[in-house]
Structures are given as C-alpha cells and as structure tokens.
Amino acid sequence: MVEVNSTMVIQMINFFLLIFLLNILLYKPILSVIEKRRKMMEKSDEETRSLHEAVEKRMVEYEEKLHRARMEAMNQRDQIKGEGAEKGRQIIEEAKEEISRMVEGFKEKLEREREEARSILQDRTKWIAVEISEKILGRGIQ
C-alpha cells in the first residue's frame, strides 16, 4: 500500500522542479528553434512565390508584346498590299525579319531572366540548407 509521507512530498517537489527546469532548458529553446525555422521556410516560400509571379508577369508581357508585334505586322502587311506587289513584298519581308529579331530578342531576354531567377533560387536554397544544417547540428558547416 502507498503511504503519504514526507518522501512522497519530496518526490513530487523533485518531479515538478524537474519539469520546470526541462521546460526552461530544453523545451522552450527547441520550440524557439523550430519556430525560427518555420518562419525562415515561410519567408523562403514567399520569395519563391514572388519570383515565380515575376517570371509569370514577364511571360505575359512577352506574349503581349509578341501579339502586338504580330498585329502590327499584319496591319503593315494589309497596307502594303494596297500599295503594290513589289513594294509590298519588300516591306513584308522586312517586317518578318524584324519580328524574327524581336522574337529572338524576347526569347534570349526571357531565357536570361529565367536563368537569373533559377540561379537566385539555387543560391537561396543552398544558403537555407546550410542554415538549417547549422542550426540542427549546432555548429558551423564547411
């Protein structure tokens, strides 16, 4: 049978003191590290989303400019048909070359921007991985 005496009271005090100390020394620091990591991941996700939105916006602008260029070329072509066959053929070819150059320029610009965004995301990913590893391990990583 269990007796209620001073030993039991001392054991209860020890138990609550241990819980209190573990809370201060272990649980709160671990929870704060986890919270910092969560915030860092949210920030990283937000940056990724904003970069993705920027890329999407640039794609829309590119497609809009391409559409405008095509529309402009079609209008020029219609005007040129009325002016004469030979002069019309010359202007149409010039417009096609201009569109090709514009399209190539847009493609190159888009590819550069896509590579820049990819590079930024890769650099941030490496940095975040190192930060997380350092925090988990509790020491610097070389």
Image: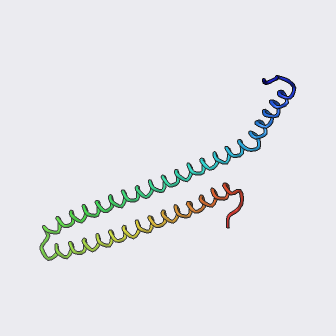
Q: Measuring 68% from the left and 64% from the top, which residue is drawn there?
A: 141
Front-most of residues 33 and 113: 33
Give percent across and percent down for residue 43.
57, 50
Give percent across and percent down for residue 53.
44, 53
Tell me the quarter of the picture where residue 134 sits.
Answer: bottom right
Image quadrant occupied by the C terminus: bottom right
Q: Measuring 41% from the left and 68% from the top, which residue is drawn there?
A: 111
Q: Measuring 86% from the left and 29% from the top, which residue is drawn there?
A: 7
Front-most of residues 4 and 91: 4
Q: Measuring 29% from the left and 63% from the top, which residue is drawn there?
A: 69
Residue positioned most to the right: 6
Give percent across and percent down for residue 3.
82, 23
Position of residue 134 in the picture relative to residue 14 (left or right)? left
Position of residue 31 in the picture relative to residue 67 (left or right)? right
Position of residue 95 in the picture relative to residue 13 (left or right)? left
Front-most of residues 130 and 62: 130
Residue positioned most to the front: 1
How many labels were placed on the picture?
Answer: 0
* Snapshot colouring: rainbow
Vertical order, 100 against 52 (above or below):
below
Tell me the quarter of the picture where residue 82 sits.
Answer: bottom left
Give percent across and percent down for residue 37.
62, 50
Position of residue 79 in the picture relative to residue 11 (left or right)? left
Vertical order, 38 against 5 (above or below):
below
Image quadrant occupied by the N terminus: top right
